[in-house]
Image (cartoon, rainbow, N blue to C red):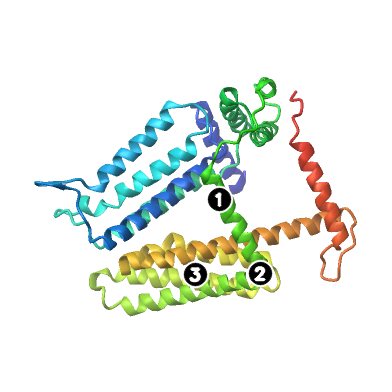
C-alpha cells in the first residue's frame, strides 16, 4: 500500500467513524463557520475602535463594572438557544452572526483573564486573539476542507433542506439545491424515500431573507468585476510583494528593540522571507503558466495570513490590523483571478474535446465559446431537474 493509499484509508475511516456516531457534516458548514470567524474578528476590531473613540467608558457604578465580556456571553447563549430550539437550516446563518458577535466581545477581554492585574491593554492580547481565530479556522479546514463529502452526508444535507421545506414549503432555488444534494448522494439507502419527500413538499415562491448569503454574493461579484480590469490583479501582486518586503524590513528593524522577545522579530523575518520567496516564484512562473503562478501568489498571502500576521500583531499590537485587511483584499483578488483562469482553461478544454477551432493563442473562437457555454448551461439545467432515484 502506498503512502497516499494509507492516507486515503485513514480519512475514509475517520468519516466512517463520524457517520457511525451519527455526525454527518453540514454541506454549508464552511459558510456558517466562516461567517462566525469573520464576524468574530470584525467585532473585536469594531469594539476596540469604538472604545478608543469614546475614551473607554465603563457601564456601572458604586464599585460595579458591566464588562462587555458579559454581553458576549449573553449573545452566545442567545445563539445556542436559537440553534438548539429549531430544526432545519434556516436559523444557522443568524446563529453564526449572533454567536460571532458574542464570541468577539468575549475574546476581546482575554487580556483581563491572563494577567494578575486584569490588564485589558496587555500587549500580547492582539496576537492571542489572532492566533485563536486562525486556530479555529485551521480546525474548520481539517474538518471540512480535506475530506470529500460521503454520499450519506449529501443525503443528510438533502433531508436537512427538506426539514425547512416540510414546514414552510420550497422555493425553486431551495428545491433545486435539495435535488442537487440528492443527486450527489446517488443510490444510497433512503435516497428513494427522500426523493418522494422532496416531491411532496409544497411550492413556496416567497424567498426568506438571507443577509449573509447576500453579502457573500455581493463580495464575489465585486471581486470578479475588479479582476476584469486586467491591471487590478497585478496591483494585488504588487501589494503582496510590497507588504512581504515591508514585513521583513520591519522585523529586522525591531530585532534589537524586543530584547528577550527576539523570536517574535525572527518569526516575522522568516515568515516574511518565505512569503517573498513564494511571490517571486509566482512572478517567474505566471508568464509560462498563469494558473500555477497565481497558485504561488495565493500560497504567499496564506503564509502572511496564517503565520506572519501573528508576529506582526505581537510587534505593533493593533496597527497590524491594517496589514490584515490588505492581506484579505489581496487574497480575495488573487482567488477571484485564479477562479477566472481556471474557468477559462476548462472552457478551452471543453472546446478542444468537441473539436472547436481555436484562435492562434489557443483560445476557442467566440462562436464556439458561446455554443459550449450554452450546452453547458443546458446540461446544468437538465441535471437540476428532479430525477427518479432508483
Rendered-image quadrant of the N terminus: top right
Q: Is residue 277 above or below residue 198?
A: below
Label 2: which secondary element = loop
What residue is drawn where x is 24% and y is 55%?
111
Disc 1: CA contacts within 10 A as few (<14), some (14-19) or many (>=20) = few
Q: Which of marks 3 and 1 is nearer the N terminus?
A: 1
Q: Which of 27 and 60 is in front in this view?
A: 60
Contact, CB < 8 Å: mark 3 with mark 1?
no
Report if residue 124 is visible in the image.
no
Q: In this view, does 115 lie to the left or right of 314?
A: left
Q: Which residue is situated farthest in the left direction here?
A: 62
Marks 2 and 3 sit apart, C-alpha to C-alpha, by 25 Å
Marks 1 and 2 sit apart, C-alpha to C-alpha, by 21 Å
- Which label sits in the foreground, 2 or 3? 2
Coordinates of residue 159 in the picture (x, y in percent): 60, 27
Label 1: which secondary element = helix
What residue is drawn where x is 37% and y is 55%?
131
Disc 3: CA contacts within 10 A as few (<14), some (14-19) or many (>=20) = many
Q: Is residue 55 left or right of residue 299?
A: left
Q: How many labels does the image show?
A: 3
Q: Name the residue beneath numbered marker 1.
A: 216
On the image, which quarter does residue 15 sit in?
A: top right
Q: In this view, does 384 lie above or below 302?
A: above
What residue is drawn where x is 60% and y is 26%?
165
Q: Which of marks 2 and 3 is nearer the N terminus?
A: 2
What residue is drawn where x is 70% and y is 58%?
342
Q: Name the residue beneath numbered marker 2.
A: 229
Coordinates of residue 143 in the picture (x, y in percent): 50, 42
Disc 2: CA contacts within 10 A as few (<14), some (14-19) or many (>=20) = few
On the image, which quarter does residue 307 sit in?
A: bottom left
Q: Name the residue beneath numbered marker 3.
A: 275
Q: Is residue 284 above or below residue 70?
A: below
Amino acid at each position: 500500500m502506498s503512502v497516499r493509499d494509507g492516507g486515503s484509508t485513514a480519512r475514509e475511516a475517520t468519516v466512517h467513524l463520524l457517520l457511525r456516531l451519527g455526525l454527518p457534516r453540514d454541506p454549508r458548514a464552511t459558510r456558517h463557520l466562516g461567517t462566525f470567524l469573520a464576524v468574530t474578528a470584525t467585532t473585536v476590531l469594531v469594539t476596540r475602535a469604538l472604545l478608543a473613540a469614546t475614551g473607554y467608558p465603563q457601564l456601572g457604578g458604586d464599585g460595579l463594572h458591566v464588562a462587555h465580556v458579559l454581553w458576549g456571553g449573553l449573545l452566545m447563549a442567545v445563539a445556542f438557544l436559537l440553534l438548539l430550539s429549531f430544526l432545519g437550516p434556516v436559523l444557522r446563518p443568524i446563529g453564526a452572526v449572533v454567536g460571532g458577535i458574542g464570541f468577539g466581545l468575549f475574546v476581546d477581554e482575554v487580556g483581563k483573564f491572563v494577567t494578575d492585574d486584569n490588564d485589558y491593554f496587555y500587549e500580547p492580547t492582539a496576537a492571542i486573539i489572532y492566533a485563536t481565530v486562525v486556530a479555529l479556522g485551521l480546525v474548520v479546514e481539517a474538518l471540512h476542507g480535506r475530506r470529500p463529502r460521503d454520499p450519506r452526508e449529501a443525503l443528510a444535507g438533502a433531508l436537512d433542506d427538506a426539514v425547512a421545506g416540510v414546514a414552510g414549503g420550497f422555493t425553486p432555488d431551495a428545491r433545486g439545491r435539495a435535488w442537487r444534494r440528492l443527486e450527489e448522494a446517488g443510490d444510497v439507502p433512503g435516497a428513494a424515500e427522500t426523493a418522494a419527500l422532496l416531491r411532496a413538499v409544497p411550492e413556496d415562491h416567497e424567498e426568506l431573507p438571507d443577509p449573509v448569503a447576500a453579502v457573500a454574493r455581493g463580495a464575489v461579484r465585486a471581486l470578479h468585476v475588479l479582476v476584469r480590469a486586467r491591471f487590478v490583479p497585478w496591483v494585488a501582486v504588487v501589494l503582496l510583494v510590497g507588504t512581504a518586503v515591508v514585513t521583513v524590513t520591519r522585523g529586522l528593524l525591531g530585532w534589537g528593540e524586543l530584547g528577550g522577545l527576539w523570536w517574535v522579530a525572527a518569526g516575522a523575518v522568516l515568515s516574511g522571507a518565505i512569503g517573498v520567496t513564494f511571490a517571486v516564484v509566482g512572478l517567474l512562473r505566471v508568464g509560462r503558466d498563469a494558473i500555477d503562478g497565481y497558485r504561488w501568489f495565493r500560497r504567499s498571502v496564506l503564509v502572511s495570513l496564517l503565520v506572519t500576521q501573528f508576529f506582526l500583531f505581537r510587534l505593533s499590537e493593533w496597527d497590524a490590523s491594517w496589514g490584515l485587511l490588505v492581506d484579505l483584499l489581496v487574497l480575495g483578488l488573487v482567488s477571484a483571478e485564479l477562479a477566472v483562469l481556471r474557468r477559462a482553461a476548462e472552457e478551452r478544454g471543453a472546446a478542444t474535446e468537441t473539436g472547436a477551432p481555436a484562435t492562434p493563442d489557443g483560445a476557442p473562437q467566440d462562436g464556439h465559446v458561446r455554443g459550449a457555454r450554452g450546452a453547458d448551461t443546458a446540461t446544468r439545467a437538465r441535471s437540476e431537474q428532479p430525477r427518479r432515484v432508483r
